[in-house]
């Protein structure tokens, strides 16, 4: 199995790195990993840690020492410690067993060691100890059990513990899904694979890279199967981590010419010279989003919290009279693009420059502002008033909603100008419609880059920022940023793989 250790260091950091145990740094504790102690030394170390660390007690000492072993997946050290505890007839509590199971997983996946029958029996034995002690497991223990079971022939038992995690109110993590997916791929259990992938898609959880890489390695000779997974990556707008790009390339290169390319804002691939396809929405798709917002979401009072009903009425009448607009600007959001501690003079200058940008393009624009902007410097605000329609809302109103309402009422060609990604509004849509909304946003949302009061307008990138195929060539995007979804950020991926089947 192909798995990279950094994936697990990320898990380690998330699950264990912030615990107060680990923060309680101790030189004695560090010796655990350096010295690989024998039974005699364990006695000394255990006593010293308890003497030196105020937060450590008889109950958490074992779990603390085992946590240390995650550093470098030192299973041998952990097992030596467990042997020591057993030799002293000390009880190994749930927290310690649970950590030991997770450590088994980390060790065998990070180090890609052969996994023997007796090791499998060991893991199952530890899992059974915990399972027998409790009818229901807490989420963290259930997660560790799932990881442990994923190494064994009893991996399908893990689904029971998926339920325990869900019952505790926690969502299943990418790691939980991915470890079982990996086992399902190993066993060619296609219905399980696609059920899990579809569930992840619904829950907006992205599989770990090693799952995709394992699939490509396994099915590289079957073009349909490779395409099936590439389409999943595309449909779910998955942006892959750049750190894995070489592994993707290695998995695909037996059957593909793989070029690492960077694609600039004009959207032409320097390798295959194709222009990447546009993200343009169909009019029917726009109409669906507009209908959902205008006929459903905007009708509900809960989205207009803090907004005076008479103001909404006044705004709707105003839009009906003055629409359509070529562009709608969130005035305050744009003005505050350099921070909210500057003077009204700076804010009004930025706003006036943005209005000028659209005026120069001979566009009819609407600026949505707040009432307190009336007191901003006259010169700039007069320019704004004379060159755009200005609607001022109460100071506490939710400007995004006004912006969206005006834009969707104006039609499919209207652009919006805001730094806000409007996630709280897109979350109100079904997952499918959310993706369409995000494409609309990508196509129509202008951004602002400001440096020392100089305004630079960033026009939308209008080509696909997700994996896609044109003329049987796939382009696969990678990013070095800590995000998993391009459409959520509209950033230009740092690097692409241009893939041509040979
Ligand atoms: Zn290309």
Image (cartoon, rainbow, N blue to C red):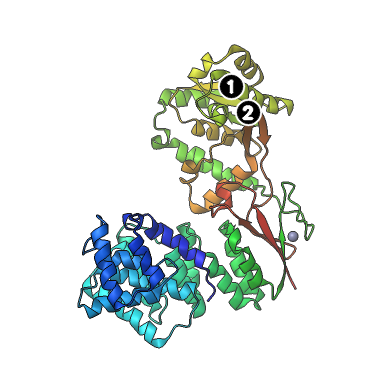
Q: Quick check: which quadrant has ligand 1?
A: bottom right
Q: Nearer the viewer, residue 457 or 102?
A: 102
Q: Residue furthest top?
A: 378
Q: Secondary structure at mark 2?
A: loop
Q: Quadrant of residue 122?
A: bottom left
Q: Name the residue that disc number 1 marks.
A: 346
> How many numbered markers are drawn?
2
Q: Name the residue that disc number 2 marks.
A: 452
- The mark that comes first in sequence, 2 or 1, is 1
Q: Secondary structure at mark 1?
A: helix
Numbered circle sitting on residue 366: none
Q: From the viewer's perspective, is 367 left or right of 114?
A: right
Q: Residue at x 67, y 26 (%)?
A: 364
Q: Nearer the viewer, residue 150 or 118?
A: 118
Where is the C terminus found, in terms of image quarters? Answer: bottom right
The CA distance from mark 2 to mark 1 is 10 Å
Residue 178 percent coordinates (x, y): 47, 68
Does 324 appear above or below 278? above
Q: Are marks 2 and 1 in contact (CB under 8 Å)?
A: no
Tell us which disc is closer to us: 2 or 1.
2
């Amino acid at each position: 199995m192909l798995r990279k250790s950094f994936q697990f260091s990320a898990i380690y950091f998330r699950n264990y790195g912030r615990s107060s145990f680990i923060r309680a740094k101790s030189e004695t504790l560090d010796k655990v990993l350096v010295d690989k102690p024998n039974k005699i030394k364990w006695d000394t170390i255990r006593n010293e840690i308890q003497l030196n660390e105020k937060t450590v007690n008889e109950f958490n000492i074992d779990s603390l020492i085992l946590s240390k072993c995650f550093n470098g997946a030192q299973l041998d050290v952990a097992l030596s410690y467990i042997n020591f505890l057993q030799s002293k007839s000390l009880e190994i509590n749930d927290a310690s067993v649970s950590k030991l199971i997770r450590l088994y997983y980390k060790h065998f996946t990070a180090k890609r060691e052969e996994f023997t029958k007796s090791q499998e029996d060991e893991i199952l034995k530890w899992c059974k100890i915990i399972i027998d002690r409790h009818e229901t497991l807490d989420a963290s223990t259930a997660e560790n059990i799932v990881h442990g079971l994923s190494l064994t022939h009893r991996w399908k038992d893990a689904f029971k513990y998926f339920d325990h995690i869900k019952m505790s109110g926690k969502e299943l993590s990418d790691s939980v899904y991915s470890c079982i997916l990996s086992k399902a791929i190993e066993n060619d259990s296609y219905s399980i694979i696609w059920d899990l992938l579809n569930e992840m898609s619904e829950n907006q959880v992205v599989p770990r890279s090693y799952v995709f890489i394992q699939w490509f390695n396994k099915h590289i000779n079957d073009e349909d199967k490779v395409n099936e997974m590439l389409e999943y990556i595309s449909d779910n707008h998955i942006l892959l981590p750049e750190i894995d790009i070489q592994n993707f390339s290695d998995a695909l290169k037996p059957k593909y010419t793989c070029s690492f390319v960077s694609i600039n804002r004009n959207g032409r691939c320097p390798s295959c010279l194709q222009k990447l396809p546009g993200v343009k929405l169909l009019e029917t798709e726009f109409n669906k989003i507009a209908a959902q917002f205008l006929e459903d979401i905007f009708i509900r009072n809960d989205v207009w919290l803090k907004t005076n009903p008479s103001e909404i009425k006044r705004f709707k009448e105003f839009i009906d009279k003055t629409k359509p607009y070529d562009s709608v600007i969130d005035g305050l959001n744009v003005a505050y693009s350099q921070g909210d501690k500057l003077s009204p003079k700076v804010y009004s200058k930025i706003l006036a420059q943005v209005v000028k940008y659209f005026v120069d393009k001979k566009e009819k624009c609407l600026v949505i502002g707040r009432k307190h902007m009336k007191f901003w410097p006259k010169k700039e605000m007069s320019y704004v008033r004379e060159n755009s329609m200005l609607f001022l809302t109460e100071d506490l109103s939710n400007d995004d909603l006004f912006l969206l309402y005006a834009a969707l009422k104006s039609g499919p060609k209207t652009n919006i100008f805001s730094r806000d990604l409007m996630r709280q509004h897109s979350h109100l849509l079904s997952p499918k419609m959310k993706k369409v909304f995000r494409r609309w946003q990508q196509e129509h949302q202008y951004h602002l880059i400001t440096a020392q009061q100089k305004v630079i307008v960033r026009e939308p990138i209008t080509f696909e920022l997700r994996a896609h195929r044109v003329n049987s060539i796939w382009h696969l995007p990678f990013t070095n940023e800590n995000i998993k979804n391009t459409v959520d950020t509209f950033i230009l991926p740092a690097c692409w793989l241009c893939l041509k089947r040979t």
